[in-house]
Image: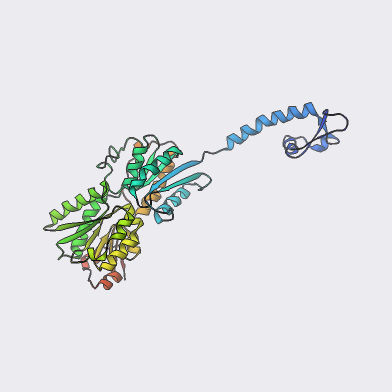
Amino acid sequence: MNLHHSDEGPLDLIQPSGPYVLRLEQHGIALDSLGDGYMKRREFIALLGGTAVVWPLAGRAQQVKVARVGILTPAETDQTPIFEAFRRGLRERGYTIGRDVIIEFRSARGDSAALPKLAAELVSLPVDVILTDGAAAARAAKDATGQIPIIMGTTGADPVELGLVDSLRRPGRNLTGFTLLHGELSAKRLDVLRTAFPNATTITVLLNPHPGSEANFRAVQEAANKFGPMTLRRVEAARPDNLRQLRPESLRGDAPILVLPDAMFWNHRREILALIAAARVPAVYPEREYADDGSLIAYGPNVPDNFRRAADYVDQVVKGAKPGELPIQEPAKFDFIVNLKTANALGITIPPAILLRADQVIE
């Protein structure tokens, strides 16, 4: 900012320059109207003071609040189909990431025990809303705050049974979102498995032993009791290193495998697929991404679509909606995929009853 003084008096006349020239011109005063470009100091200060009042007010009127969204997940990266679907959902609603919305990503890297600390970090920032991935993340977020809205992108079990909400229709409190009906669907996957392998009397169930998966396991156990004499053998993995410690020998035998849905499993599905492929045992998986990566049979909801739809709930609560008044929504898209390439590699034949029910058959 330069103020040039006239030689005619020490501070009597001022020659505006730089940003002051712009202000004068925007207020209809051209420099050529000032003769030699100088004006009286008192006039300049009076004009400058008036414009200083107007400009900040105009600038504030044009400001738009930037929404800060926290993501709490066991995933190791935000470059996954579910988070890309969420970002796409935001863009569909007119948000530009980095301008209208800032995303704060917090990953437990497969260790659910780290989620409470990460949830506390998001609360302390603070963020305007928290998007959670999986039941354990939803629980951690709920325990961390009763004020900040929480949107579940997915939860592995009935959120009412888990004590997260009062009801599906009217959740109450500060939490809402999307459920994947995993208890009901896990029982249906067991039905798919016994139809595909009718001679199996023992089923190996791979699960992450947290409340959501335990609820799913109970649903599978109830279904097994109805279907007839069927024994369930539990194989547990709570963290990625537990998955890496499993050996193909521990899965070999006549028992096909049912993989229960879990956010950590989903993010480490390639390791699970490699383990089961090495054991040369047929298996049924909970989401289509397993099929995309080469699984035998996948049956379940389309998880990325849930996260795309979650962007709408985020948009609503950022604009003032109360999460407790937004109903918990069920999946809108489901996938049933059979991979005959994998079946041929295992030397097994998939019954026509399964092929006819499949949405997609990979040959």
Task: Out of 137 and 286, give the one closest to the viewer.
Answer: 137
Q: Looking at the image, is 148 positioned above or below residue 181?
A: above
Task: Please state, as top left, top right, bottom left or bottom right, where the C terminus lies in the image.
Answer: bottom left
Task: Out of 156 and 55, give the one closest to the viewer.
Answer: 156
Task: Please state, as top left, top right, bottom left or bottom right, where the N terminus lies in the image.
Answer: top right
Number of disc labels = 0
Q: Where is residue 153 in the image (x, y as percent from the top left)?
A: 36, 47
Q: Where is residue 123 in the image (x, y as percent from the top left)?
A: 42, 38
What residue appears at the point 86 percent right and 36 percent down from the top-left corner?
36
Residue 142 as seen in the image, left or right of residue 54:
left
Q: Where is residue 229 in the image (x, y as percent from the top left)?
A: 11, 58
Q: Where is residue 37 in the image (x, y as percent from the top left)?
A: 83, 36
What residue appears at the point 21 percent right and 54 percent down from the top-left corner?
187
| Image quadrant where residue 281 sits | bottom left
| Image quadrant where residue 296 sits | bottom left
| Image quadrant where residue 32 sits | top right
Residue 100 as seen in the image, left or right of residue 292:
right
In this rendering, does residue 347 appear at all? yes
Which residue is farthest left?
A: 229
Task: Out of 321 and 5, give the one closest to the viewer.
Answer: 5
In this rendering, does residue 335 appear at all? no
Q: State the colouring used for the structure image.
A: rainbow
Residue 88 as seen in the image, left or right of residue 294:
right
